[in-house]
Image: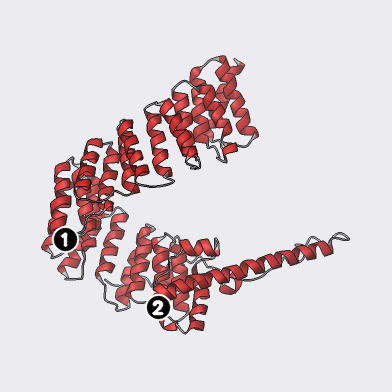
Amino acid sequence: MGFVEPLSLLSSRRGVSCCAREEGLGRVFEIEGRKGNGGDGPLPTGMGNLDSRAKNFKSDERSREGEQQQHNVKLLFKEFRSSGKLRYPKDATKLLGPGRCGSAFMKALLKEMKEDGMLGKVLPLYNSMIHALGVEGYPNEMWSVFEEMQRGGIKPDIVTYNSLMKGFAKAGDLTKVRLVFKEVSRKGLTKTAVTNATMIDAFVRNGDVFNAEALLEKLKASEFELNAIAWASIMHAYSQMGDLERVEELLRDMQKQGHQPTSITYSIFMNALLKAGRTHRTVQVLQEDMARSGIPITADNYNVLLHQCAKRRDLKSALKLYSTMESNRVAPDLVTLNIMVNVAGKAGNVDVARSFLNESIHRGFKNNVVGYRTMLASYGRARKYEEEMRLLEEIQAEGIELDLKMMTSIIQTKIETGRLDEAIETFGTLDSLGIKADAFLANKILHALQRDGSESSIRKGVELCSQLETQRLPMNNHTNELAKLLRKLLSN
C-alpha cells in the first residue's frame, strides 16, 4: 500500500488536529505570581502591600505544589524503573493533577532517567506512555507525546506505531489509523500481526465490515502475519448483528488458517449463540470446546455471557450458566453476583435477585454500591415499597453513601405507589444528603402532580417549579414546559 500523506501532516489537516500542546516541564513547575494589577491603573493608596503579600502567599503555595508534583513524578518514575511499566494516566493524573499529563510529564520523567543513567530505556518509556494514553482514551495527549519523541530524535519502532493505531482506533478516527498504517510501510517496518489486526479492528469500529473483510482476505492471500484478533473483530461485528451463521464461518476460517480460538473469540461465539437462543450449545462451548483448547475458564468468560442474559431479561439462561459455573468450580466474583441481581430484578423475580445480593454479602464483598443500587431498582420496578424502604435502612446501616440513582429509585416508587407527598418531601432532602437533583427526577414529580390533576397537586407543582427556579436546580426544556402548563392550570 503506497503512502498517501506524510504522518507529519496529521497535526495540520483540517478537522484532524491532534496536536494539543502540553505545557513544558518548566511551565508545569513554574512559580508564577500575578503581574501588576492587570493594567487597570495604579492601585488605591494602601493596597500595594496587601497585593504584594497576596502575591507572595500564592507564590509560596505554588512552590509547595510544585515540590509535591516533583515528588510525585519521582514516585511514578521509581515504579517504572522497578517494573518497566507505567500505570498512566490514571495514577499520573491523580498524583500530578488535571492538565499535568502528556509531553510535560514525559519531560519530567526523561529528566529523572538522565539523572539515573537510564537513557537506554527511553524508547520503552515512550512506548509505554503512548500505549497507556491510547488505551485510556487520550488521543491528543498520545499524539503530543509522539511529537515530543520525534523532536527528541528518538526513532519510533513498530510497537510505537501499533500503539498509535490502537489509540486512534479506540477514538474512532479511522483516517488517522489508515495514515499510520501506511506510514509503517513508508518507513520500511515489518507489519506485525498486531498491526494488521488493529487496522481490521479500526474498520469494524467505524462500521465498515466490508472493508474489514476485504483487508483480511488481502492479508491472507499475501501471507501477511495475522492473529486470532483479526478474525475476532469481524466476528464481533456479526455477533452484534445477530448473524450466527457468519460468526461460525469466520471461526472455521480462522481455524483453517492455523489459528486456535482464544478466550476472546470463544466469548464472541458464545454471545452469538446466546442471542440466537442456543443456551445448550453455549454451555457446551464452555464445558467442552474451551477445555479441549486448553483455555482456562474464568469468571470473566461467564460475566460476558451473563451480561447478554441481563440485556434480554433471560433469567432462565442466566441461572443455567450460573449453575454451570458452579459445576466447573469457577468462583463467581462481585461482577457475576451483581449481574445476577440485575437479570433477576429485570425479569421481575425480586426474591432471586435478593438471594444473589445476600450471596455477595455472605462472600464478604463490602461496600457493594452497585448491588444495593440494582436491588433498590428491582424492588422499585416490582413496586415493593416496604421491601425497598427496609433495604434503604440496611444500606444506611452499612455506612454506604446514598447517591442520586438510589434516591431516584426511592422517589419513583413513592410516585408509582401513590405517595406523592412523600416523594416531594424526599426530593427536598436531597440537598442535605449532598446529592444534586437532576431535571429527570424533577420532571418525574411534576408529571405525577400534573397527572393527578387536583387543585392541591397543581398548586404543589407550581410551588416546586418556583423552588427549582429560586434555588437554580437543574431544569431542561421539558421542565420549563411543565412549569408553564401547571401555572396555566392553576390560573384557570
Residue tagged 1: 294
Occupied quadrant, residue 181: bottom left
What mark, if any, has residue 398 been given in the picture?
none
Q: Quadrant of the C terminus?
A: top right
What is the x, y in percent for residue 162? 33, 69
Is residue 484 visible to the viewer in this orientation of the structure? yes
Q: Amino acid at mark 2?
A: Leu
For label 2, the SS is helix
Q: Amino acid at mark 1?
A: Gly
- Distance between mark 2 and mark 1 Cα atoms: 36 Å
Residue tagged 2: 123
Q: Is residue 156 above or below residue 372?
A: below
Choose mark 2 or mark 1, whichever is in front.
Answer: 1
Occupied quadrant, residue 66: bottom right
Q: Residues within 10 Å of mark 1 (few under 14, many from 20)?
A: few
Residue at 25% across / 36% down in the picture?
A: 315
**Residue nearer the viewer, 116 or 152:** 116
Question: With 336 as the anchor, is 51 left or right in this view?
Answer: right
What is the x, y in percent for residue 489? 57, 18
Occupied quadrant, residue 86: bottom left
Q: Residues within 10 Å of mark 2 (few under 14, many from 20)?
A: some
Residue at 11% across / 62% down in the picture?
A: 256
Is residue 17 visible to the viewer in this orientation of the structure? no
> Please, which residue is most extreme toward the right here?
45
Question: With 127 as the anchor, is 244 left or right in this view?
Answer: left
Question: With 365 as the anchor, is 34 left or right in this view?
Answer: right
Q: Is residue 479 above or below residue 360?
A: above
Q: Quadrant of the N terminus?
A: bottom left
